Amino acid sequence: MKGKSLFNVFAVLAIFSLALSACGGSGSPEQPAGDGPKVTSAGFECPEPNPRVEVTSTELNLFVWTEYFPQDMLECFELVYGITLNRDEYSSNEEMYAKVSAGGTAYDLVQPTDYIVPLMIRQGLVQELDHAQLPNMKNIDSNWMDQPFDPGNKYSLPYLAGTDAIVVNTATVETIPTSWADLWNPEYAGRMVFIDDSRATIGLTLVTLGYDPNTTNPDELEEAKNKLLELVPNIKVFDSDSPKTALIAGDVDLGMVWTGEAFIANQENPDIQYIYPEEGPVLWQDNWLILKDSSHLDAVYAWLNYTMQGDVFWLTIRDFQYTNPNQAALDYAKANEPDVYNAYADSPITNPPPEVVAKGFGIEDVGEATPLYDNIWVEVKGGN
C-alpha cells in the first residue's frame, strides 16, 4: 500500500535537502479572544488566523499522540479563537483504534498512522473532509498528498512523517549494530528500549527473516512470533510516550525509536546516534481524521487551517523534529528562523539519505490478518 509511495516522497525530499546543503487542556494563559496581540505563557506572539474561520463552538476535543505538539501552537489556537482545547493522548494506533471503535467518546479529531486509516474508513468511524473549508491545505507539499491509503485525501490530511530505525549510545555499546538482525545479540540483554508499536516491531522481525513486513501468511507470522520472543530478553522497556528519556538518562543503551525522539536524544547527547539498518528503516506518515460523530466541525476546520499556516506549523520544526510535509512551514522557517531550519535540513535523521530511503519499507493495512498480528503482540508483551 503505502511503502512504495512513501519511498518516493522521502526520496524526493532527501534529494532536495542534499541540494540545499498528557491529557486535558493545553494550559494556556487566561487571555480572552479580542483585539490586540495574543501572547503565550512562553512569550510567543501568536499569528492571526489566515483566513479566520467563523466559529460558534467553544471547545474542540483531540485524541492524539503523546509529545507531538508545540505548547505554543496549542495555546495560540485557544487564544486567537477563544476555544478550549481538550486533549487526550495515546501511545499506539491500536490503543487509539480500540477506544474510538468502542464508541462513547466525544472526540472530534484523531491522528492515526497511514496503515490504520483504511481500517477506520471501512469501519465507518470517520467522515469525509470538506476541501472547500480547507484553504490552507495548499500549504502541504503535494508529494505527501494523494497517498494510496487515502486517494485524493478524501478523509485525511498529513501531519508529520518519519522513520523507525536503530538508536545507540556509541559510548556505552561495544558492538555497534548495523542491522535489525543485530539486535538479537545477547550482548544487549536488558539494555534496549523499543517503541510500543506492534506492527513496526513485527514488521522488522519479518524483514530479518526475509519475509514481507505485511505478510498475511500464518506460517510466516508464527515464525516471526517465535523469533520476536527470542528478542524480548534484550528489551528492558517498551515506551512510546518518551523513549528518548531512558536513553538520555542512561537506563538503556540502544533500541528502536522514531525520528523525532532520536533527534532530541542526539541533541542532548551526541554519543547517541541514529543508525539506519541494512535491511532498511520503517517509513511512516501520521494524519488527521475527523471522527464521524464530531460535534464541533467549525472548530475542527478552524484548527486544521490555523495549524497548517506556515507561521504556525514551523513550531513543529522547532520543537518536534520529524520529517515535515508542510512546505509553507519549511519556507517560513528558512526565511525567519534559519538556525531552526538549518538544524532540520542538515540532519540525516530528519532527511534520510536517498540510498537509505530506497531500502525503506512501510506498514500496511493487512485486513483480515490483523487479529494474527494482535495475538502475536499479546503473547510477546506478556513475556516482557
Image (tube, rainbow, N blue to C red):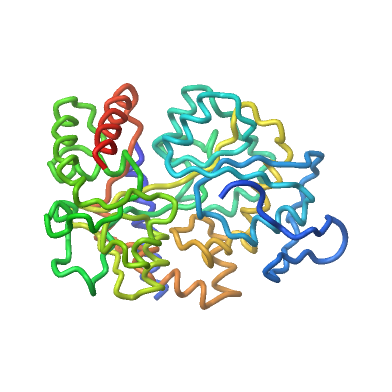
Nearest the viewer among 130 and 284 is: 284
User: Which of the 4 image quarters holds residue 209?
Assistant: top left
For the point 12% across and 55% down, which residue is it?
Answer: 185
Residue 200 at x, y percent in the picture: 30, 43
Count all numbered tags in the image, as a single digit. 0
The answer to which image quadrant residue 34 occupies is bottom right
Identify which residue is drawn at 14% across, 36% down.
226
Residue 130 coordinates in the image, percent (x, y): 65, 35
* Near-viewer residue (189 or 154): 189
Q: Is residue 184 left or right of residue 52?
A: left
Residue extending furthest toward the right:
35
Indicate the quadrant containing the C terminus: top left, top right, bottom left or bottom right. top left
**Quarter of the image with the N terminus in it:** top left
Q: In this view, does 337 lie to the left or right of 84?
A: left
In the drawing, does residue 93 fall left or right of residue 3?
Answer: right
Residue at figure coordinates x 43%, y 42% from the top left: 113
270 in relation to 202, above or below? below
Task: Please state the horizontal and vertical placement of residue 50, each as a whole percent of the image.
Answer: 73, 56
What residue is at 22 percent from the left and 55 percent from the top? Answer: 190
Q: Compared with residue 362, is residue 325 higher up or lower down, i.e. above or below? A: below
- Counting from the top left corner in percent of width and height, residue 134 is at 66, 44
259 or 253, which is in the foreground?
Answer: 253
